[in-house]
Image: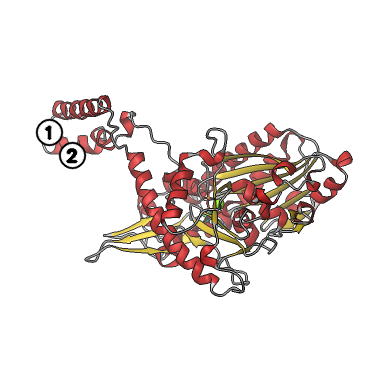
Amino acid sequence: MAEQTFCIDFGSGFTKVGLRRHPTATTVLVNDHGIDTTDFCYHSVVVIDRSGPKPVVEYGKKAAGRAPANGIEIHANWKQWLFLTPSGDEPGANSVEAFLRTDELAKLAARHGVTATQIGHLRQLVSSARELLAGAGVQPVTRDAQRQQFAASLAVYYFTWLRQEVLKECERLPHAGVKYADIPTRVSVPAFAHGSNVTTHPGCKFLTTALVKAGWSLHPENPVVSEPVANTVGVLTNGLNATKKNKVDLGSMFNKGPVITVGANAKYYAPYRAIVVDVGGYTTDFAVLTLRQDGLLDADPERAFDAQQHSVPLGVSDLDKRVLSVLPPEKAAWLSKRSADELDGFRVTLYTEGKPVRSGVIGTVGAPGTEGDAVRDQLSQFAAAVGAEVRQFLTAIGTGGTNELVLTGGGVSIPAVRDAILTAAAADGREFVKIHGPDIQKKHTGKPVHKLDSRIARGGGAIGGSSLFFEPALA
Ligand SMILES: Nc1ncnc2c1ncn2[C@@H]1O[C@H](COP(=O)(O)OP(=O)(O)OP(=O)(O)O)[C@@H](O)[C@H]1O
Ligand SMILES: [Mg+2]
C-alpha cells in the first residue's frame, strides 16, 4: 500500500488534486486556502502562444485569462480527446478524405474552375492510397487519432506544470517526515464501459503514460480509479481516514449519516445505497455504492460495498454547444473568442442566474424575448437529457432500501439541471432519506438536505480518490 498519496481528478474544465499526507490524515485539497474560494480548481486550459519568434506555453489562471487570437491557440476541453476511440478504416474519419468531401472545398473548386469530376478523381486517388496502405498494414492517421495524439502530448506538458504547482503549494504544508516529491499519485477517470473494468479504457493508458512522463510516480496498486466511485467515497467520508489495529476502519470513516444507521441495523433498513450524480464539463457520472450486510465491519473496502458506475459524455460543454447553435452567428462568434475565465462567468450568469450577458460590443446575449427564450429552451432540453440519463440509471438499480442522493459537479449548481435530476430521481416511486448538494434547500426536495460546500461539491473526487478506501493492502 502507499502510506501517502495524491489523487488527480483531471477534469475537462478544472483539475483538482487531493492529498493524504499519512495513512490516517484527513485528505486535503491542494491549493485550498481555507477561505470560500475554489483555488483548488486548477484550470485544465493550455494556451500555445505562437505569436512570437518561439512558441510559449501557458497554463492555469494565466491561460484561462487568454482569448483566442491570431497565433494564440487555446486548448480547453481536451480531456475528451484522450477518450476517443478512433477507428482507422472509417473513410469519413480520415482528415484528407473528410476535407475532400466538404462543401467548402466544393465552393472553392467552383470559384477556381476546378470541376466536380476532377475533385471526384482526387477523392478516388486518396481512397485508393488509403486502401493500398491498409493492405500493407499501414493505418492512415485519422483525425480522431491525430487529436488523441495531440492531447496525449498536451497532457505531458500539462501534468508537468501541474506537478510544479502542486509541489510548490506543498511547501506551505507541514514537512516533518514527508517528502512530497516522492508521494505516488492516482488519477480518476470517467466510468466508460470498456472490457471488464473502467481502468482498461485506452484513454487511461494515455493518462498514466503522460503522468509518468511528467514526473509523477504512479500509485503501486491502484493508479486509476473511477471518478464517480471516488466522488462517492469523498462525499460520504468527508476526507476522513481511519484505521483500527492496522486495518482500514470503514465504520469510523463513514461515521456520519444514514450509512452508519443502516450498517448497524442491516436487518431493518437494508439495502443502504448512496447514489451520486456528478454533472461535469465533459461527462455526467453516476455511481451507486450498496453496503453489503455487515460491510462496515469488513476491513476490505472492496467487499464492504458493491459499486455500480456509469458515465455518459454529456456535460456543461454540451450545453454551451447547444446555446451557441441558437444564437445569432455574430454573437456565437463573439462568445467563441472569449477566454475560459470569461466563459465561466457567463455560464453562471446565463445558466444559473438566468440573466443575459452584456457585452458592450455585440449587445446583449440571451436578452429577454426570442433570444432569451431560445437559450432557456436549450437549457431545458439539456436538463431533460440529464434527467433522462438519471432515470435510466436509477431504473436499473430498482427501488427499496435506504437511499441517499448526492449531487456534485459544476453542472448541478444550474437550477434547471438540479431540478431535472431531483424530478427524475423521485420518479418511479423512489425515495431518498437525505439529499446532498450545493445550494440545495429543503424546499427543493421535501427531504432532509445536506448543503455541500464547494470543496466537496467540486473536489469530492480528488478527496475520495486519495482515501484509504483505495488501499487494498491495508485490508
Ligand atoms: N454555478 C455555476 N453555474 C453554471 N455553471 C457552473 C457553475 N459552477 C461551475 N460551472 C461549470 O460547470 C462545469 C463543470 O465543472 P466541474 O469542475 O464539475 O467539471 P470538470 O470536473 O472539469 O468536468 P469533467 O468531470 O466532466 O471532466 C464547468 O464548465 C464550469 O464552468
Ligand atoms: Mg469532474
Residue under the point 16% across and 36% down: 109
Q: Which residue is mark 1?
A: 114
Q: Is residue 149 above or below residue 368?
A: above
Up-down: is 393 above or below 344? Answer: above
**Crowding at mark 1 (Cα within 10 Å: few <14, some 14-19, many 20+):** few
Q: Is residue 314 left or right of residue 419?
A: left
Ligand 1 has an atom within 8 Å of the beta carbon of the residue at disc 1: no
Which residue occupies the foreground of this view, 297 or 456?
Answer: 297
- Kindly indicate whether the residue at mark 1 contacts the one at mark 2 (C-beta within 8 angstroms): yes
Compare residues 404 and 446 and report the one nearer the observer.
Answer: 404
Quarter-of-image position of residue 360? bottom left
Q: According to the image, what is the colour scheme of the structure?
A: secondary structure
Who comes first in sequence, dot 2 or dot 1?
Answer: 2
Which residue is at 60% across, 58% downward? 459
Residue hosting label 2: 108
Which secondary structure lies at badge 2? Answer: helix
Task: Tell me, yes or no, if residue 433 can be seen here.
Answer: no
**Nearest the eye: 198 or 344:** 198
Question: Percent position (x, y) of residue 372?
Answer: 50, 51
Amino acid type at mark 1: Val
Tell me if residue 292 can be seen.
yes
Q: Amino acid at mark 2?
A: Leu
